[in-house]
Image (cartoon, rainbow, N blue to C red):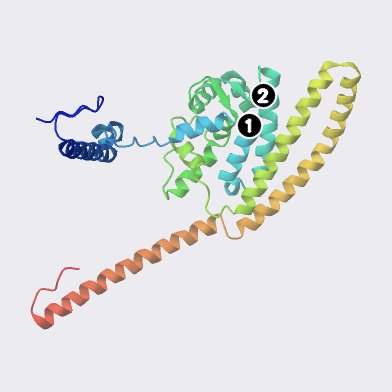
């Protein structure tokens, strides 16, 4: 027998046999190396469980989640969103919304611990101060009803859907082309359990909201936030006292005296954009959309009738049943 010892290099046969054996041994080694190079590493094999595992679908953000997220933003951002949604429904009274935002923040800060939101008692008092007369029980129940996330706090957007409840419900039923189930003649007084309708309408942008109008609203909100930030910084300096405090108070007076002029300028710009958008938007856009749907439905019905007529004609001529369309 031939014994090969790679380490010692000894062979027990003739030189020819040794050479032949060595040649075969090297060939076997080379073949083994080629196999090892072709064979995938264990980690390269697909795990069957991973192969069969389907990616988990991402949970769609609910309307309530979106509303909660909106309520956590700056009150001015909430004001901007509300204006985008109801700029046409508000008509000329849209200017009341930014003023309400300023007054909401002041009331929240003066009667509570922050300028971002209120507790239920503060919100009920603010509602009453702004002409929304209710009994104590009605205010309590309606404020609780719009506290959508039940955190005991009322954000500005939650206050707005309470303040404009009747208008929002009116828009909701108008969009669905239905008669209101609630009595809206008393400005929504006493109406509760309508949260889903209010949120659905809030997140339904009006037909014909032009990019120019959106940009004007965003500019308006950005200017308002920038001014408020400046006022807050000057107020903090004024409260600190000293020479810097006196200078800050003086700057605040100048800022406040020019505030009305600047606000009016912004409102005029926004009003112009709104009027331009209304020429081809609002009720007219809704009417056009409805007419287009009616035309499409009529064309579809005419096509079906023509097809049925053609099949009937084929049946009358050939005496055979026409193929199904």
Asked whether, in this view, residue 161 is left or right of residue 13, the answer is right
Residue 82 percent across, percent down from the top left: 58, 40
What label does residue 115 carry, if any? 2
Residue 228 percent across, percent down from the top left: 74, 31
Q: Are marks 2 and 1 in contact (CB under 8 Å)?
A: yes
Asked whether, in this view, residue 88 is left or right of residue 145, the answer is right
Residue 268 percent across, percent down from the top left: 74, 49
Q: Which residue is mark 1?
A: 75
What separation in Å lies between label 2 and label 1 (alpha carbons)?
Answer: 9 Å
Please state which of residues 164 and 207 is positioned toward the viewer in this rendering.
207
Q: What is the residue that sits farthest to the bottom in this orientation?
A: 317
Q: Quadrant of residue 242?
A: top right
Q: Sort mark 2 into few (<14), some (14-19) or many (20+) by Cα contacts within 10 Å.
A: some
User: Is 18 above or below relative to 116?
Assistant: below
Q: What is the residue that sits farthest to the right in this orientation?
A: 243
Q: Residue at x 87, y 20 (%)?
A: 245
Q: Earlier in the sequence, mark 2 or mark 1?
A: 1
Please state which of residues 82 and 181 is positioned toward the viewer in this rendering.
82
**What SS does tag 1 mark?**
helix
Q: Quadrant of residue 258?
A: top right
């Amino acid at each position: 027998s031939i014994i090969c010892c790679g380490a010692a290099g000894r062979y027990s046969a003739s030189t020819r046999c040794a050479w032949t054996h060595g040649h075969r041994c090297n060939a076997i080694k080379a073949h083994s190396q080629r196999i090892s190079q072709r064979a995938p590493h264990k980690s390269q094999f697909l795990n069957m469980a991973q192969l069969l595992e389907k990616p988990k679908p991402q949970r769609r953000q609910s309307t309530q989640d979106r509303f909660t997220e909106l309520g956590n933003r700056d009150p001015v951002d909430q004001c901007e969103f509300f204006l985008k949604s109801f700029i046409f429904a508000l008509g000329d009274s849209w200017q009341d919304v930014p003023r309400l935002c300023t007054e909401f923040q002041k009331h929240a800060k003066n009667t509570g611990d922050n300028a971002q939101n209120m507790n239920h008692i503060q919100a009920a008092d603010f509602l009453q101060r702004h002409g929304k007369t209710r009994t104590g029980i009605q205010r309590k129940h309606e404020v609780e009803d719009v506290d959508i996330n039940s955190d005991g706090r009322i954000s500005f957007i939650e206050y707005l859907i309470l303040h404009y409840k009747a208008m929002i419900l009116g828009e909701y039923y108008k969009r669905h082309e239905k008669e209101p189930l609630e009595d809206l003649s008393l400005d929504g007084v006493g109406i509760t359990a309508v949260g889903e309708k209010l949120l659905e309408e809030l997140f339904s942008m009006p037909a014909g909201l032009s990019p120019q109008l959106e940009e004007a609203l965003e500019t308006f909100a950005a200017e308002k936030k920038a001014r408020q930030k400046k006022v807050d910084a000057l107020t903090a300096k004024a409260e600190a006292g000293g020479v810097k405090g006196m200078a800050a108070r003086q700057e605040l007076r100048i800022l406040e005296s020019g505030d009305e002029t600047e606000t009016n300028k912004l409102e005029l710009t926004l009003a112009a954009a709104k009027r331009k958008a209304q020429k081809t938007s609002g009720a007219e856009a809704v009417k056009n959309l409805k007419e287009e749907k009616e035309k499409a439905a009529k064309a579809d019905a005419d096509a079906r009738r023509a097809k049925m007529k053609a099949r009937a004609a084929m049946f009358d001529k050939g005496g055979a049943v026409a193929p199904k369309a």
